[in-house]
Image (cartoon, rainbow, N blue to C red):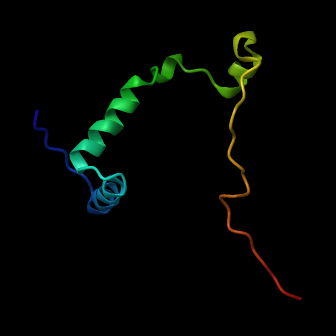
Amino acid sequence: MNVTVKLPDKLCREARHCAVDESKSLSAWVADLISRELKQPPLASRKSLLEMLGDPATADRDFDLPDRKADRPRKITFP
């Protein structure tokens, strides 16, 4: 099915680059993105991290958390 979607130029350029990086067409990349999103449970039924930590069913689960300092540039000063 053909669908027309209007995107801001910058967003479209970034999406095209992501598609090229994965050796896909923009259409295939967007279709994969939508497919992954639709496989997720609805937001209303998702548990927060706090709820998951308190749930005995997920008590033994490992959670990969990003390094909070890795995303921030570090200021380096010289004496």
Relative image position of residue 23 (x, y in whole percent): 31, 53
Q: In x, y percent, where is residue 50?
A: 72, 25
User: Quadrant of residue 29 in the image?
Assistant: top left
Residue sitting at x 25%, y 43%: 28
State the residue lying farthest toward the bottom.
79
Is 37 placed left or right of 60 in the picture? Answer: left
Viewer-side residue, 8 vs 63: 63
At horizontal 72% and vertical 23% (from top left) the residue drawn is 61
36, above or below 67, in the image: above
- The quadrant of the picture occupied by the C terminus is bottom right
Q: Residue at x 68, y 46 (%)?
A: 66
Which residue extends farthest top?
A: 56
Left or right of 61? Residue 37 is left
Residue 9 spot, x, y in % from top left: 26, 62
In this orientation, which residue lies closer to the viewer: 73 or 59? 59
The outermost residue toward the front is 23
Q: Position of residue 37 (x, y in %)?
A: 39, 31
From the image, which quarter does the N terminus lie in? top left
Question: Which of the 4 image quadrants contains residue 62?
Answer: top right
Left/right placement of residue 70 relative to residue 31 reads right
> Total number of numbered labels?
0
Residue under the point 45% across and 20% down: 42
For residue 58, which quarter of the picture?
A: top right
Which residue appears farthest toward the right when viewing the image?
Answer: 79
- Is 56 on the left or on the right of 35, as rendered? right
